[in-house]
Image (tube, grey):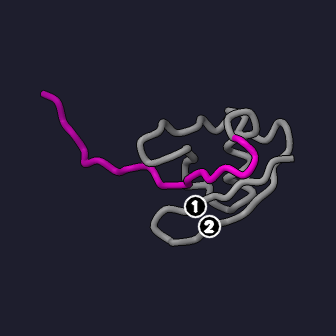
Amino acid sequence: MKKLSVVVAGSGQIRDVEIEPGTTAGDLLQQLNLSDYLLSRGPNEPFFAASESAYDKVRDGEKIFASTKAEVGDVVWA
């Protein structure tokens, strides 16, 4: 088991969780009821794919971040 702190962007919440081997980023988001969010190790880090093993990507005691996808306006190319 690994203990993590998940910082929920824009809410000020920090949720402490324990995950076990095989836990994916999608599993973790579902466990936290954050299905519209993505996980990353920091603001300038790439997002984890939902199917990626969160357990393998993080260290015990690490703080990770849950944030929503950035919405960018519609672009029409002619």
Looking at marks 1 and 2 on the same chain, the residue that comes earlier in the sequence is marked by 1
For residue 36, side relative to residue 52 (left or right): left
**Mark 1: few/some/many CA within 10 Å (<14, 14-19, 20+):** some
Q: Residue furthest bottom?
A: 12
Q: CA distance from mark 1 to mark 2?
A: 4 Å
Q: Which residue is mark 2?
A: 14
Q: Measuring 52% from the left and 72% from the top, which residue is drawn there? A: 12
Q: Position of residue 23 (x, y in %)?
A: 79, 41
Q: Was residue 53 drawn as part of the magenta stretch in this picture?
A: no
Q: Give 59 or 35, whichever is nearer the viewer.
A: 59
Q: Label 2 amino acid?
A: Ile
Q: Measuring 81% from the left and 55% from the top, which residue is drawn there? A: 18
Q: Was residue 68 drawn as part of the magenta stretch in this picture?
A: yes
Which portion, as a residue range, is magenta? Answer: 59-78
Res 17 quadrant in image: bottom right
Q: Residue furthest left?
A: 78
Q: Position of residue 60 (x, y in %)?
A: 75, 46
Q: Are marks 1 and 2 in contact (CB under 8 Å)?
A: yes
For residue 36, side relative to residue 51 (left or right): left
Q: Measuring 18% from the left and 36% from the top, which residue is drawn there? A: 76
Q: Quadrant of the C terminus?
A: top left
Q: Position of residue 68 (x, y in %)?
A: 47, 54
Q: Position of residue 20 (x, y in %)?
A: 85, 44
Q: Secondary structure at mark 1?
A: strand
Q: Give 60 or 9, whichever is nearer the viewer.
A: 60
Q: Which residue is mark 1?
A: 7
